[in-house]
Amino acid sequence: MNTPVSASRRNFLRTGAMGAGALVIGMGAGGALAAPASSAAPAPDAFTPNVFIRIDRKGVVTLVSKQPEIGQGIKTSLPMVIAEELEIDWKDVRIVQGDLNPAYGSQGAGGSTSTPTNYENFHRLGATARTILVQAAAQTWGVPASECSAAHGAVVHGPTKRKLGYGALVPLAATLPVPDAATVQLKDPASYRLLGTRIGGVDNAAIVSGKPLFGIDIQLPGMLYAVYVKCPVFGGKPLSANLDAVKAMSGVKDAFIIEGTENLNGLRPGVAIVATSTWAAFKARRALEVKWDEGVGANHSWADFAAQAKAAAGKPGATTLRQDGDVMKAFAGAVKTVEASYSYPFISHASMEPQNCTAWFKPADGTLELWAPTQNPGAGQALVTTTFGIPKEKITLHIIRSGGGFGRRLSSDFIVEATAIAQKTGAPVKLTWTREDDLQHDHFRPGGFHHLRGGVDANGKLVGWHNHFVTFANRVERDGKSILQPGSGGSLSGDEFPGRWLANCLLEQTALECRIPMGPWRAPGSSVFSWVFHSFIDELAHVAGRDPVAFRLELLGDKDIVPGTGERGQPYSVARMRNVLKAVADKADWGKRKFGPGQGAGVAFHFSHRGYVAEVAEVTVSKEGQLKVDRVVVVSDIGAQIVNLSGAENQVQGSVIDGLSTLMYPELNIEKGRVVQSNFHDYQLLRMPDTPTKIDIHFLKTDYPVTGLGEPVLPPLAPAVCNAIFAATGKRVRELPLSKTDLSWS
């Protein structure tokens, strides 16, 4: 995930000349402004305001999008912020993708951080450029700047109605100093013309017409094509292979073993095949025969993990994450108690575009050029440096649009694999993973087991909560010590709801050691914890004879902020969560709608990635157990402004559909250290007939900083649907995927 740019407003902006007629306003890695690496003078008919903004003499504005685009719409939405403050019509804006460049500041796309990290700074960039252009016009006319205003790519003098387009102001504006930050006025949000409207993605036309945009589309003169074969057992390595036979095949240029490293998320050992086409490389791969050292990972199986988790339940040795009050005493005094075990499997990211990277290593000067569909280019560059010793200044990394990410492309294993192969070829080489590679050598969302117990008193109030969480961890070396590190999203926080809301709470965690590589999966942790917690809360509301919404409102309490360290260091605003919960109940007519047999509604909420979201799902389940999600109502509080309404709605709809898909079908079974599933024929995802009939989307505008939207909506979907299933059928879903539960009823 990314470290937010830190800088005072006063020192955030500075100007620098880039030849005659050049204005520079940019954002450096530490928040101060910096010129681009190249400072060549612009063409006479154009000028460049900064590493982010370029305005030509026709008034066309080119904006750099610095964050990776993975389908979340950031390539469109962040430039909209600059365009709004710059007072330029969107039709006159052109967007280009920026390469990895320290002058841009942080450049990752993960954790729904891109918008909150850059939103305020981008406003100031646009407003400062607009202020300079207004000053240039005022000086041209010899009038006070206070009499001038900008609109539609031009500056207008109020009293005389004279107008000068931005292009005409370029020469003078380039000579003016950047004004003091205190004198730069941001627009009143009430006057926004662009933000909050629906703007289509800047790449939409190219996508629907099949133009090359993605990493897998890269073509370079003299390029070779590669595949990389790793041991099917996690942590295994090749001992020998029929390399001579493979190299003798038509179209094959080379085949060789790469020793790799012990880092499960880095350059793993394997066999590379380099050929004159992807087809030739894939064909040679089928003829490859490798003798593997499978290592200790060959002992892994999901059945054994499940048995270990069951044996660990309630046993000594667990790590205590939170202990408030006396849980055992609370259970003893409870009128009713409920015990339940919830489990979920490892799953893959299953992005549409398999991992790929094009690399060109030039031995003459030791430089490396990379074309990578990555979510975390800085981390990719750093991993290349630590793995191969190539200095960062000798690495050029082009950020290419990704065909989906969901956290998978925060890892950089495919980048170091391509680099290792390129170092042996002497030519540009494109590494392409197969779908099977992508599914079986993912950095998986960790599986998990939760053993829960809760108690309610005579008034139907929750008085005790115990969760023993069994998770998965890799053994790593840190500060000279060997420790178990839970997988990303596989470690429970002691502050998770409803932990710090209760007087009597015990949260424990046990880690099962494994060699399975794990990584962040969309809304890490939250995507499964929300399902577990809000499903079990629903169970407790039911035995207490309470309305599920009222039960949750009572749990939240009436404090505005609950003490403790919130998710990602953010405080938890109870008021905001109460508001979205009340709003979703209102929008869904909770408690007012009449449902027939096999129909029901369920509710859930969750706070993740700074966003507050509540959802109500309405379902119909046939007597044979066929599920149909009829409607999902979503209420989100993600701050004071929706940047791009079209993109925001798309993210909500996508999160609901992705959340439902993940609930219903995908699972990875582990046998003898191998993933059993291999492709979409046995790793099913949601199909169009299964999607919700209707998704109602509502945003609450609040006086809080703007946050991201790629992840917060996904977590509440699964528990809302499962709670609705219970309301419709009386059956609880305690194991994922949903397809493993018989939903038939009579």
Image (cartoon, grey):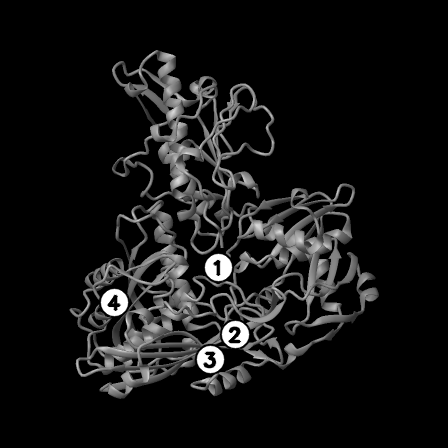
Q: Secondary structure at mark 2?
A: strand
Q: Secondary structure at mark 4?
A: helix
Question: How many angstroms separate mark 1 from mark 2 (CA)?
Answer: 20 Å
Observer-nearest of 528 and 492? 492
Q: Are marks 1 and 3 in contact (CB under 8 Å)?
A: no
Question: How many angstroms separate mark 2 from mark 4 (CA)?
Answer: 30 Å
The amino acid marked with disc number 3 is: Ala
In the rendering, at what x and y percent does residue 116 appear? 39, 48
Label for residue 406?
Answer: 1
Observer-nearest of 146 and 731? 146
Which residue bears the numbered disc 3? 318
Q: Are marks 2 and 4 in contact (CB under 8 Å)?
A: no
The quarter of the displayed image where residue 200 is located = top left
Label for residue 472?
Answer: 2
Which residue bears the numbered disc 4? 556
Left or right side of 311 for 703: left
In the rendering, at what x and y percent does residue 391 appear? 68, 46
Task: Look at 17% across and 70% down and name the residue there.
Answer: 591
In the rendering, at what x and y percent does residue 718 appear? 36, 70
Question: How many angstroms separate mark 1 from mark 4 (CA)?
Answer: 30 Å
Please name which of the two marks, 4 or 3, marks the residue nearer to the observer: 3
Label for residue 557?
Answer: none
- Which label's residue is closer to the chain start, 1 or 3? 3
- Which label's residue is closer to the chain start, 1 or 4? 1
The image shows residue 194, relative to residue 269, as above or below, that is: above
- Which label's residue is closer to the chain start, 1 or 2? 1
The amino acid marked with disc number 1 is: Phe
The amino acid marked with disc number 2 is: Phe
Q: Are marks 1 and 2 in contact (CB under 8 Å)?
A: no
